[in-house]
Image (spheres, rainbow, N blue to C red):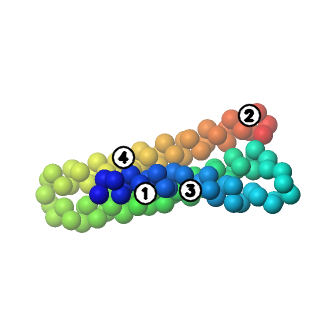
Amino acid sequence: MKKLSLLTLLAGLTLPFGLVSAQNLGKYGNSIYLGDILASIETTTWVIFSCIVVVCFVISGIAFLTAQGAPEKLKLAKAAVLWGGAGVVVGIIAYSIEVIIGSALGV
């Protein structure tokens, strides 16, 4: 099971690079611009991040529903929600930093 999870994670991490090359070919003839590649990577990464956030909170909700009042299970479910929220905050801050630096550099 761990091997399957690891393979799924690796496939998800390499997916943006395949999408980038497929999206940008032929857009400007034979030329591919770095800005377009980075924008495609950013968009794909943001979509994957959003999907992971939704899955995280669904799993946390299921953990709450299946806890049935057991203190240990409730503690794990609360921790999952807390860390899921922390992940969302970190993701939004990471995206915001990129935008702030880009506007400061005039890009």
User: In x, y percent, where is residue 10?
Assistant: 46, 51
Residue position for label 3? 15
Residue type, mark 2 in image: Ala
Left or right, 2 with reference to 69: right
Q: Are marks 1 and 4 in contact (CB under 8 Å)?
A: no
Gap between marks 1 and 2 measured at Cα = 37 Å
Residue plotted at (23% across, 51% down):
76
Give the total number of marks visible in the rendering.
Answer: 4
Residue type, mark 4 in image: Trp
Q: Secondary structure at mark 4?
A: helix
Label 1 Cα neighbours within 10 Å, binned few <14 / some 14-19 / many ≥20 = few
Q: Secondary structure at mark 1?
A: helix
Residue plotted at (71% across, 49% down):
37
User: In x, y percent, where is residue 63?
Assistant: 26, 61
Which numbered disc flags the more N-terminal residue, 3 or 2?
Answer: 3
Residue position for label 2? 104
Gap between marks 3 and 2 measured at Cα = 30 Å
Q: Nearer the viewer, mark 1 or mark 4?
A: 1
Gap between marks 4 and 2 measured at Cα = 31 Å
Tell me the tag on residue 8.
1
96, above or below 62, in the image: above
Which numbered disc flags the more N-terminal residue, 1 or 4?
Answer: 1
Gap between marks 1 and 4 measured at Cα = 21 Å
Q: Secondary structure at mark 2?
A: helix
Residue type, mark 3 in image: Leu
